Each structure stands twice: as structure tokens, then as C-alpha cells.
Image (cartoon, rainbow, N blue to C red):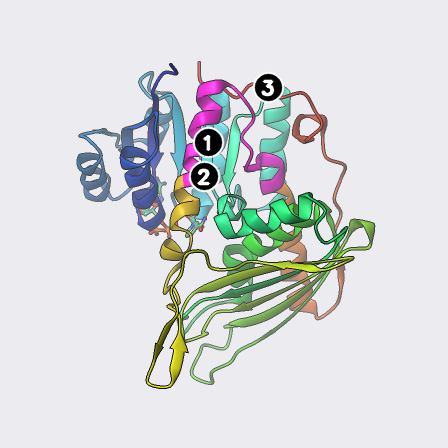
């Protein structure tokens, strides 16, 4: 019987509230120990909804509090690196929403700090790795059903876009997930990127780039394309395909119904990511809490994956801005993060 993991949640906006509710209601062996948000009322509301958890005015006090075994960070991007560092200093496992940091250099410092500790404490919320549809593709590829994976093709569509949406935000907030899928599903690293982007509506602000096409070259001769359309209109949709030597594997909607009516045949399309990835968000936390309880490595994205994502998204932003292909410097994966390395202990003290 493993002990219950008491999780402190920093940032109780859209994602933090969903994660806190999931921990409280749907993740076995987890409890919400406390919440913290610059909007105290919001933190208090979520704490009350999660069994009367404590409310911390200072997120660093939440991290250090002895009743908190592990920390989930879902605050604004710019706060992530400092909170993750504090968790490493406190020796506490941490699930950090993407991005791990705002710059590759900050992410690299966190990787170095974790390596100095010699154990993996950091998990990053790149949740495609827990999406049942993506996992089905991964299983087929790993089983060799289409021979060696050669190309990843990702489609990422949002229904609506704010009238002001800089291309770099589309890359760091949306495309980052598909870049991670390409690395994960092909098992290769990105070596070069080329990115084109356009503003699809005249009334969008001048800086807006709401439709992007990313082309990636990966190690071992692999390729990837990622289409991100932010004003698709019809709904939220994410699809992934791996083209292999002998066939292709594509995500498919499980357990859906086709309605035929009035001369049409239709299935529903999700409207936002919280619906599309409902199960992935739960399974990600189930996997994380299990890893903390059992002292085994989290099978989702690590600090290393968070760092590499940042390096690739930085290169994509440069490619978008310059219109030129950009080389991606990816150093060799350190032993702590290699799949063939001995399992590292992540457990809470
Ligand atoms: N994995 C995914 O699919 C996914 C989806 C959406 C957002 N995200 C990430 O989740 C994070 C939160 O996004 P969101 O959509 O919930 O945003 P949000 O704006 O709804 O919530 C952010 C919350 O952080 C709080 N906050 C800001 N600074 C803080 C600080 N210093 N200390 C404590 N709280 C602070 C804000 O008050 C707000 O309540 C972001 O990093 C975002 O990139 C991930």
C-alpha cells in the first residue's frame, strides 16, 4: 500500500483548476494539499472544491511546506523556471506545465541542477504522450507494424483565435506539443527547421500569424511536417500520422458514433483542448503520482524533453522570423535521461 501523495498546486487558472480537480477526484493515491495563486480568491475556491485544502499566499511557502509531498505548476509561463528550481532545491517531485522555462538557457540550467542531484524530479506536461489516440500510434510504431518510422505528420487546429496572436506564441503554446510528438513517435532528434506562417484575416493585428507550416529534419534521415491552424472555425482537432517503410499509422477517434441524417453522415468535433485531451490530462497525473509513489521514472516528458522542446521552438521562431532554414543544436542525451539507463528514483521523501 503506497502512501497518498499530497500535491500543492501553484496557479489555479484554467489548467491548474482542471489538474487540481483531476487530482482530487480521479487520481488514485493523490490529494490536493494546498493551492496558491496571485488571485487569492481563485486559489481559495479551488482549495475548497478539493476537500478544503490549505491556501498559500506565497507559492515558495507551499513548495517548502512539510505537508506538501509534490508540486504541480500551472501558473503563467514566465513563473515556471523559478518554481521548478525551488522544487529541486527542496528535493520535491514537480509536474510543470509546458513550457519548462521561457528560454532554452533557463531550461538548460534546470537540467543541470537536476543532473547535479542525480535523480529525476521534474516532469513536464507535454500530455500527448498520455493521449489514448497518440499512444495507439506509438504502440503500432514500436511493434514495427509499418517498418521503421520515416515521417511524422501533425495537424493542430484551434476553432478560434484572438485577433492578436504572434507567430512565436503559436509555436511555443501550440506547435511545441506536435514537435514533442514528432521526437517521441519517431524516436529521433530535430536537426533543422523551416517555418512559413501567414495572417489569414485582414482584421487580425499586424503581428498575428495564425496559420503555420513547420518542416523538420530529424536524425536518421527522418522528416516531419506540422500544420497549425489557429482559426479553423469548425472546432479543435489534433491528428498525428507516422509514415513508415511499409505503411502508415494515423490517430483515430475511439468509441465515437456516426450520425446519418438528412442526407449527411457526421461525427462530433471537440471544441477545446480540455475536451479533446480530457483523458490524457487524467492519465498523465495518474502516471506521475504512481512514479512518485513507487520511486520510478515518470514515463512522460522529462526536464530533458522540456529543454529540447525549448531549443527546437526557439529555432522555429528564428526560422519564422528570417524565412530561412535554421540548424538545431541538440547535444547528446545525458545518461540520466536515456531510456536504456537504470531507472532513477523520483520518489517523495
Ligand atoms: N498542456 C496543455 O495542454 C496546456 C494547455 C493550456 C495551458 N497550458 C499551460 O498551463 C499554464 C497555465 O495556463 P492557463 O491556460 O491555465 O492560464 P491561466 O491564465 O488561466 O492561469 C494561470 C494562473 O496562474 C496565476 N499566476 C500567475 N502568476 C502567478 C504567480 N507568480 N504565482 C501564482 N500564480 C500565478 C494566474 O493568476 C492564473 O490564475 C501555462 O503555462 C500554459 O502554457 C498547458
* Residue identified by numbered label 1: 288
* Residue identified by numbered label 3: 117
Q: Is residue 256 visible?
A: yes
Read off the magenta span: 283-306
In three-dimensional space, the C-alpha distance between marks 3 and 2, rounded to whole angstroms, equals 24 Å
Q: Is mark 3 within 8 Å of ligand 1?
A: no
Tell me, for residue 134, which label it has, or none.
none
Are the residues at dot 1 and dot 2 in contact (C-beta closer than 8 Å)? yes
Locate residue 191, reporting x and y percent. Answer: 76, 52
> Residue 14, relative to residue 1: is it above or below?
below
Are the residues at dot 1 and dot 3 in contact (C-beta closer than 8 Å)? no
Among the two numbered marks 1 and 3 on one chain, the one whose residue lies closer to the N terminus? 3
Q: Secondary structure at mark 3?
A: helix
Picture mark count? 3
Would you say residue 205 sits in the magenta stretch?
A: no
Residue 92 left/right relative to 342: left
In three-dimensional space, the C-alpha distance between marks 1 and 2, rounded to whole angstroms, equals 6 Å
- The image quarter in which residue 115 lies: top right
Residue beneath the point at 62% across and 32% down: 111
Amino acid at each position: 500500500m503506497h502512501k497518498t501523495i499530497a500535491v500543492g498546486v501553484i496557479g489555479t487558472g484554467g489548467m491548474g483548476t482542471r489538474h487540481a480537480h483531476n487530482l482530487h477526484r480521479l487520481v488514485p493515491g493523490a490529494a490536493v494539499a494546498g493551492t496558491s495563486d496571485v488571485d487569492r480568491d481563485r486559489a481559495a475556491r479551488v482549495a475548497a472544491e478539493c476537500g478544503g485544502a490549505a491556501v498559500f499566499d506565497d507559492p515558495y511557502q507551499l513548495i517548502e511546506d512539510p505537508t506538501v509531498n509534490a508540486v504541480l505548476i500551472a501558473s503563467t509561463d514566465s513563473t515556471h523556471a523559478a518554481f521548478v528550481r525551488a522544487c529541486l532545491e527542496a528535493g520535491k517531485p514537480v509536474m510543470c506545465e509546458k513550457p519548462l522555462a521561457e528560454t532554452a538557457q533557463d531550461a538548460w540550467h534546470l537540467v543541470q541542477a537536476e543532473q547535479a542531484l542525480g535523480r529525476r524530479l521534474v516532469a513536464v506536461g507535454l500530455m500527448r504522450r498520455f493521449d489514448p489516440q497518440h499512444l495507439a500510434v506509438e504502440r503500432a510504431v514500436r511493434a514495427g507494424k509499418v517498418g521503421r518510422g520515416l515521417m511524422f505528420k501533425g495537424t493542430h487546429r484551434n476553432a478560434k483565435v484572438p485577433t492578436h496572436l504572434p507567430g512565436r506564441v503559436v509555436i511555443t503554446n501550440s506547435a511545441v506539443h506536435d514537435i514533442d510528438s514528432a521526437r517521441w513517435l519517431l524516436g529521433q532528434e530535430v536537426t533543422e527547421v523551416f517555418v512559413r506562417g501567414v495572417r489569414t484575416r485582414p482584421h487580425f493585428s499586424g503581428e498575428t500569424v495564425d496559420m503555420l507550416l513547420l518542416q523538420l529534419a530529424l536524425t536518421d534521415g527522418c522528416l516531419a511536417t506540422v500544420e497549425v491552424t489557429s482559426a479553423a472555425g469548425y472546432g479543435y482537432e489534433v491528428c498525428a500520422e507516422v509514415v513508415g517503410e511499409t505503411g502508415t499509422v494515423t490517430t483515430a477517434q475511439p468509441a465515437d458514433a456516426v450520425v446519418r441524417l438528412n442526407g449527411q453522415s457526421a461525427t462530433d468535433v471537440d471544441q477545446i483542448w480540455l475536451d479533446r485531451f480530457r483523458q490524457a490530462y487524467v492519465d498523465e497525473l495518474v502516471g506521475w503520482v504512481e512514479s512518485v509513489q513507487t520511486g520510478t521514472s515518470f514515463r512522460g516528458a522529462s526536464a530533458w524533453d522540456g529543454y529540447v522542446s525549448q531549443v527546437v521552438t526557439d529555432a522555429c521562431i528564428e526560422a519564422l522570423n528570417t524565412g530561412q532554414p535554421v540548424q538545431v543544436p541538440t547535444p547528446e542525451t545525458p545518461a540520466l535521461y536515456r531510456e536504456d539507463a537504470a531507472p532513477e528514483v523520483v520518489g517523495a521523501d
